[in-house]
Image (spheres, helix red, strand yellow):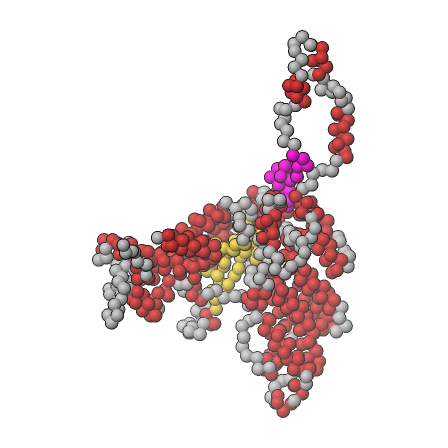
Amino acid sequence: MTNTKRKKTLCDFFAGSDVPTKGKSHDCGPRNANLRDVGSSNLGKEHAIMEETAYRAMAKFFCQAGASPKSIENVHFKKFIAYLNPKFRPSSAILSRYCLELYEEDKAKVKETLQSLNGRVSLSVERLTYNKFNDFSYWPTSDFEETYFDFICLRVHFIDEDWKLRSWVISFRSFDAYDDYVGETIQCLLDFGIEDNICAVTVHSYLDIDETVDAIKSNLLEKKTLQLDGQLFRVSCCADMFSSLVNKAFGMIDDLISHIRLIVCWGRSLPVWNVTFLKLQEALELEAKGEYLKTDDYKGYDIPSPQEWEKVRGVCKLVGHVYNAAQVLFMAKRPTAGLYFHNLNKLRFNLMKDSASSDEFAGNLANSMLKKFGEYWRNMYLVLALATIMDPRYKVKYLEFCFLKYGGNDHSPLPSILEAIRSLFNDYVVDKSSMEYPLSDSGSDDSDTGEDLISDEFDTGEDLLEPVEVLDDPSFGFDCSDEFSKFIQTTSQPPKSELDCYLEEPIFPWTKNFDVLSWWKAASPRYPALSNLARDLLSIQLSHVTGYEAYYTEVREPDRSTTSMEADLVNALMSTKSWCDKQWRNAMKAEGSVAQNK
């Protein structure tokens, strides 16, 4: 018996398709009618179903890639579709509708996931700006034409039940598309069911959204769900702070940088400060070797004087401290709060040391940078300290070490930090029993009293009335039970909380590739309440971006393909693209297993 089943090909997903025969033409037929009006189509019922399957498959692809449905109008894409099926000519308008439908389907799953979380979420609000002048194909049609477009990206960050960090977009819109940004943001949080479950919001230092943050905060205050009176609520982006420090330093030698750019043959580059720093370092190395003393080779160039080179050297030393910290925090695969706390402490210490420099220029600049850093440090110190305690490689001992190493043995902040962590922990304890470890596991029942044991073992009978009266005396045989109970209460140690047990455990040895989330996943049965606190603190975003994007000195741009799409479609594509990190992988595995079973 032969197997009549054949494997499906790409052509099977397109209505009216046949496997192309060699030598035959693949000219496209007339455009299909709207697939909703099946009766007006000359395709059969089976072909209409296959067409819908094809549109859904394409919608999944475009949503996962975050690409514009208008891409199917590309001539090469049309040729590809014509090869698969000459009769099928997809419409970008129909594909857009399928993308919106897919967004609504996945949004329902995302809402269910967020509302079933056993913990809190943190938010981040990022601004992206599209500048038409950066598009080489742009040609202005009017002197009054608007060339800048701001987009606001609202993300929700949380650690799921499998202890994986998730970062999902729940709103991505042009700022001009909002009639009431504050009201629509609150409505978005209500729509996803997380308005009462927010622990922190990470914002840009230059983005004026105080009204929105205050509105979210007021709602939490009203519902009495704001932790530590809002001390952890507003989180400043670390990458923004680094860029502001570097811009302050480079601004002191802006003219010199322009001259050095020419003599080093340093062309136009992206607005990233690490490139400027590395190019200045290269110029200093050449200057130290006497390269710029060769006057014949640099005729017509403004070579900096020795005093000016010293200014450049002083600036590079200070920016070098920022660069070293940024390399650790932004280029690491998973920078933890402990890494932030350590490297920011180190940066602060180096700036303090250089502020006392005998070089007046370098000392004043270091003081100015230290003042700007201090504003960030005061706002972020408690957040960083609490999240660092939740790393078993650091705990409170590392804070003590930092106070000794970088603070001159000043332990004054430690009591307030311990008070904050204990206050937070108490909020996570559902009842007193989950806060304590039982000292014994007797398993005795309240009904199984001493009286029952005696009466079961000795059947006294009704005629022995006098001994029964003696046995009914609760103090019979032991007349100091009340005194003994008081003695136990005054001398026994109270049961230890999960937090105390965690802090008293030995510090976990420091390793570079340690996964703190995996550690808490394994430890959560021992620390059910404390692990929920760790889950929420470790999900707080300390920087909007990492990698090379963290070095930008200007507002980042969105994907240019999103700027020409309708507002609802942009939001749908950017959201589903971020959601697919887990859902699509699971869906692909499920579809693969189903296909194998057929």
Span of residues in magenta? 423-441
Percent from the top left, x then y, of residue 578? 47, 57
Question: Which residue, as the protein is rendered here, is positioned at the far bottom?
Answer: 296
Q: On the picture, is 198 further left or further right than 100?
A: right
Percent from the top left, x then y, of residue 450? 68, 22
Q: Using the image as rendered, state which of residue 151 and residue 316 is in the foreground.
A: 316
Asked whether residue 195 appears in the rendered view, the answer is: no
Above or below 350: residue 230: above
Question: Which residue, as the protein is rendered here, is positioned at the far top?
Answer: 463
Q: Using the image as rendered, state which of residue 244 and residue 547 is in the foreground.
A: 547
Queried whether the magenta region covers residue 438, the answer comes back as yes
Which quarter shows the N terminus?
A: bottom left
Above or below 328: residue 121: above
Q: Using the image as rendered, state which of residue 211 and residue 342 is in the foreground.
A: 342
Q: On the picture, is 575 further left or further right than 355?
A: left
Q: Residue at x 29, y 56 (%)?
A: 3
Above or below 587: residue 425: above
Q: Using the image as rendered, state which of residue 147 and residue 494 is in the foreground.
A: 494
Q: Residue at x 67, y 68 (%)?
A: 321
Q: Residue at x 40, y 53 (%)?
A: 593
Queried whether the magenta region covers residue 564, the answer comes back as no
Could you say which quadrant of the image residue 139 lies in? bottom left
